Image (cartoon, rainbow, N blue to C red):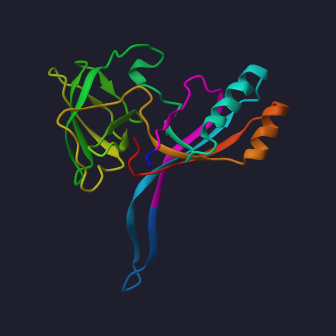
Amino acid sequence: MTIAPVELPTSWPIRQAAFGLKHFQTSGMAYGGAGQTSTFADPVWEAKYTTREMQELEAGEIEGFLGTLRGMARVVLAYDVRRPVPYAFKGQGGSPWGSPTLASFSRANGTLTMENWTVDMTLYAGDYIAFQDTDDRWHLHRVLTTVVVDGSGDVVAVVEPRPARNLATDTDAPLRIRNSCCTMVFTWDAMDAEQAVGEGRSIPIIAHQVTRAFV
């Protein structure tokens, strides 16, 4: 059975959020006493959202959203609400960045090569880029080094995490730039959440990336 992820509402009354990568590493001592760190899986995104103290209408929106996830896998297309669009276009509507597509990628170099951006625009460190692979999995990447799009609309960006192993994408896969997202599972204390809504308190919610395909 496949489950359609629910879009995180853009009007969600979020007061604070944390969004970052969880790394899977072990540390130990190598022969001779040198420190050694081993990575045994690709990192995944984690998010921590906290709502504002809510008025009645806002509380109803949150309660309704959480209600859509009950009885499901709590699967959400989640993103970093602090950077919903590239910094260069903060507060702007539409798609002023053009219609960018993924041309190629390099896991070894940790880069995405992209086309069809607005000429001469800047991608700042901290901007996000997302796209789907041929199995409908969402891949979310954060720009690590500020770069400028060239006169042809092309740019190569160093990103985290590195492109996944055995990644397969359609030719010229479109990029999701506004609310760049990945598929996450939400977890929260349902009883506490309902009580918090009733009392007008904030609700803490944790989200973890899932890497299997959803449609």
In this picture, residue 107 sits left or right of residue 204: left
Q: Is residue 27 left or right of residue 70?
A: left
Residue 91 image position (x, y, % from top left):
48, 16
Residue furthest toward the left? 152
Tell me what residue is drawn at x 66 percent, y 36 percent.
67
Rendered position, 89 above or below 21? above
Position in image of residue 32 (x %, y %)? 37, 86
Q: Residue at x 36, y 86 (%)?
A: 31
Q: Nearer the viewer, residue 110 or 190?
A: 190
x and y, in percent, of residue 164 in the image: 30, 52
Q: What range of the chain is rendered magenta?
A: 3-23
Q: Residue at x 40, y 52 (%)?
A: 212
Q: Is residue 132 left or right of residue 45?
A: left
Q: Taking 155 as reference, is 43 above or below it?
A: below
Q: Residue furthest bottom?
A: 32
Is residue 46 rendered magenta in the image? no
In the depicted structure, whether residue 80 falls above or below residue 89: below
Residue at the far front in the pictured view: 1
Left or right, 190 with reference to 199: left
The image quadrant where one finds the C terminus is top left
Residue 17 part of the magenta segment: yes
- Depth check: 30 or 168 in front? 168
